[in-house]
Amino acid sequence: MGRPRTPLLDRERITTTALELVDEKGEFSVPQIARRLGVQTGSLYHHVDGRDGIVELLRERVSAGIDIATLDLRPWDEALRAWARSYRAAFAAHPRTIPLLMTNPVRAPRVLDQYERAVSLLLDAGFPPPDVMPVIVALENVVLGSALDLAAPEAMWELADDTATPRLAEALDAAGERRADRAFELALECFLSHARRRLAEHRSAG
Amino acid sequence: MGRPRTPLLDRERITTTALELVDEKGEFSVPQIARRLGVQTGSLYHHVDGRDGIVELLRERVSAGIDIATLDLRPWDEALRAWARSYRAAFAAHPRTIPLLMTNPVRAPRVLDQYERAVSLLLDAGFPPPDVMPVIVALENVVLGSALDLAAPEAMWELADDTATPRLAEALDAAGERRADRAFELALECFLSHARRRLAEHRSAG
């Protein structure tokens, strides 16, 4: 018998299986991954640092879809806009990872490096250090809330009877298509224009 | 034998059990609810309109935590600010319902009525009808992204080594406490100040 072409277990396959489970069920467990891979649960622990380690592999996998070259763009607000759009698209492909990844601490080195670049962008632009993390987290709230919204049905409000909620019916008629994208772009524009003003105030005060 | 004090099955108990399952596992199924209640799956269908009906009962239950009297405040931006804070608190108590509720169409009459009030607030304030739903959805993205963030650990970034990401370490030190609340208030303020400017532009153009 020859050596199998792909090893039965490796971190890539464990990550892929965990991602499939989260995409399907919103959750994963180490025994479920072992079952899908046809191996003993214990043997998984030779490859990954427990459940938390798998969460970090998922974080690296999904975050790999973000174009970090966007953070090299200038001026800073163009960089943030492009980063936010790419970040949203990466997570919209796997919306059920969002609650899992948002509620576990970030340890993955490649993801920490992405934060390092985002922080550097804002510090170099002149944001005061205490504002930098709130600005990044606020932008992430917009991005991830909106990535979840992309997974929603286009017809999100099902009115049994227009007469019960006539103004909602009117607003829905007037809103047209691509609700999720338009709301995201609006929220992003709100965010960037406010951040620009705060930065200008800080500069003129400094 | 006397009549049991609480009926074995009713919509309230089904909703409570579904919410417990989602809080624990991020998901529910009709057979899981039946198992917890010690009844046959089929008998649940006498009380609720299938899985989708239970999702709507969950939506009503979680949304009941939102103080809708906030939508009667004036001016409109004070109303939206108070509504957003209350909306975030209600969903932060059950963060794992967020992906479920965001990806199923809204049918619950009491929740549709809440949208009717929010739409009325913005139309009465003078927002052009095509802007109303994008404004509401953008605000919801901020609210729900931020409600998920409230479920995150306070120490969200675990730096193995400050020297690998020195500027992230600096920004985290400078940020201080209550990251999630400060980011939410920042995002909310961004949103409201931009919306005020758009409304003023629309009024001066009209």
Image (cartoon, coloured by chain):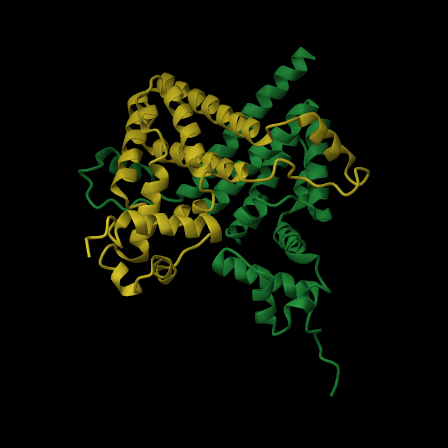
Chain colours: A green, B yellow
Find residue B188 and report its horizontal and vertical position in percent. 49, 27
Find residue B74 and report its horizontal and vertical position in percent. 33, 17
The quadrant of the picture occupied by the N terminus of chain B is bottom left
Hey, which residue is sitting farthest top in the picture?
Answer: A205
Residue at the (70%, 48%) spot, across then down: A108
| Residue A2 sits above or below residue A124 on the image | below
Residue B60 or A125: which is nearer the viewer? Answer: B60
| Residue A202 sits above or below residue A41 on the image | above
Relative to residue A37, is residue A144 drawn left or right? left
| Residue A49 sits above or below residue A98 on the image | below
Residue at the (66%, 28%) spot, across then down: A132
Relative to residue B61, is residue A13 drawn left or right? right
Figure label count = 0
| Residue B130 sits above or below residue A45 on the image | above
Is residue A22 shown to the viewer in this render? yes
Relative to residue A188, is residue B58 drawn left or right? left
Find residue A117 and report its horizontal and vertical position in percent. 71, 38
Hey, which residue is sitting farthest front in the picture?
Answer: B1
Residue at the (61%, 40%) spot, across then down: A83
Residue at the (58%, 25%) spot, across then down: A195
Is residue A126 shown to the viewer in this render? no
Q: Splitting the image into 4 quarters, where does residue B63 fall?
A: top left
The quadrant of the picture occupied by the C terminus of chain B is top left
Find residue B37 and report its horizontal and vertical position in percent. 34, 57
Hey, which residue is sitting farthest left in the picture?
Answer: A163
Q: Splitting the image into 4 quarters, where does residue A50 fall?
A: bottom right
